[in-house]
């Protein structure tokens, strides 16, 4: 137990060193013309060193926010505004999905064509009906991945209030803080560390994994090359499935940031009492008389 505690404290301290070193030596992980730098980026992007950098940032922001509560409220407003902006924009992908499906039905069933040709600004793009049909999944994935934090901010997520509903304001905030700190953040961090390498396994070769050490990755630099996944489920089907792996990371990042925002909001509402509930929250409204259908009601 003592060894684990010492390791934790040492990693928190090293997190500040790694953060400073990365900021002062950006070429070591951003200059991808050197394949070793590319593999350093791949390794550290899903490493425990990167995790402790985030932990250190979280600790610094939390301490600063406890000293200056207006700063913590500012963090909440920025993170929630970011989630709302991304979610409201990504929600339009649902309309594109519906429009694309209608076009597919008309072209395939009425005009009996096997391909769709688009030529915006004189640039021709010709793909098969199968490509567009399979591509519908991408628009659906955009809505799911990029609107998740937006739905959380809006209170549109599903929750079962067996114990939560009847307890008092401060007890609810304690439950919220515990959930965000011990469930949302750890699960998001674990998903990120594995999804990160899942993405890169479909972008470069030879394949990398979460168990690879940095020394082993740097040895692979001599033979590493780009190998972006472009294979579809059918010969003429959608071939951009690497985009789904990127969306997985976007989904996890938004969940993690929303967990931080939710923890800060819960902490502030705990400290400032019931009058601070939902302060600065930017929630959409269906209009007067539609309150019963909003949020989690």
Image: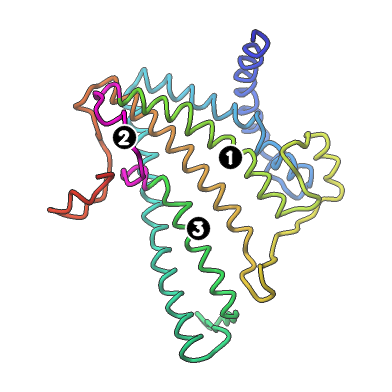
Location of the N terminus (image quadrant):
top right
In the image, which is nearer the foreground, mark 3 or mark 2?
2
In the image, which is nearer the foreground, mark 1 or mark 2?
2
- Tell me which residue sits at (25%, 21%) in the image: 272
Q: Is residue 38 left or right of residue 242?
A: right
| Helix, strand or loop under label 1 | helix
Spatial CA distance of label 1 from label 3 is: 17 Å
Q: Is residue 163 above or below residue 107?
A: above
Residue 184: percent from left, percent from top: 47, 34
Spatial CA distance of label 3 from label 2 is: 28 Å
Residue 12: percent from left, percent from top: 60, 19
Q: Is residue 200 above or below residue 180?
A: below
| Numbered mark located on residue 191 in the image | 1
Residue for badge 2: 161
- Tell me which residue sits at (36%, 34%) in the image: 76
- Tell me which residue sits at (17%, 53%) in the image: 290
* Quadrant assignment, res 196: top right
Pick the front one: 164 or 103: 164
| Helix, strand or loop under label 3 | helix
Pick the front one: 113 or 59: 113
| Numbered mark located on residue 141 in the image | 3
Mark 1 and mark 2 residues within 8 Å of each other at the beta carbon: no
Which stretch appears magenta? Answer: 151-171
């Amino acid at each position: 137990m003592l060894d684990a505690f010492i390791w934790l404290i040492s990693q928190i301290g090293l997190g500040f060193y790694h953060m400073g070193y990365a900021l002062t030596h950006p070429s070591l992980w951003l200059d991808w013309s050197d394949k070793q730098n590319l593999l350093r980026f791949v390794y550290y992007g899903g490493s425990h060193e990167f995790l402790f950098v985030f932990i250190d940032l979280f600790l610094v922001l939390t301490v600063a926010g406890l000293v200056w509560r207006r700063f913590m409220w500012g963090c909440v407003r920025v993170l929630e505004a970011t989630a709302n902006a991304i979610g409201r924009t990504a929600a339009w992908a649902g309309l594109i999905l519906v429009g694309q499906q209608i076009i597919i039905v008309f072209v395939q069933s009425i005009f009996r064509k096997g391909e769709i040709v688009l030529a915006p600004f004189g640039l021709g793009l010709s793909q098969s009906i199968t490509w567009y049909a399979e591509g519908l999944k991408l628009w659906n994935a955009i809505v799911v991945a990029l609107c998740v934090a937006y739905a959380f901010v809006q209170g549109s997520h599903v929750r079962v209030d067996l114990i939560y509903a009847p307890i008092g304001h401060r007890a609810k905030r304690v439950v919220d803080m515990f959930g965000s700190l011990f469930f949302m953040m750890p699960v998001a961090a674990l998903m990120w560390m594995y999804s990160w390498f899942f993405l890169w396994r479909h972008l470069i070769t030879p394949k990398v994994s979460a168990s690879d050490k940095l020394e082993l990755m740097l040895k692979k630099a001599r033979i590493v090359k780009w190998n972006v996944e472009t294979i579809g489920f059918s010969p003429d089907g959608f071939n951009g499935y690497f985009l789904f792996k990127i969306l997985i990371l976007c989904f996890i990042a938004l969940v993690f940031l929303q967990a931080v925002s939710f923890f800060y909001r819960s902490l502030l509402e705990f400290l400032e009492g019931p009058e601070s509930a939902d302060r600065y929250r930017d929630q959409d409204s269906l209009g007067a008389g539609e309150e019963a259908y909003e949020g989690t009601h």
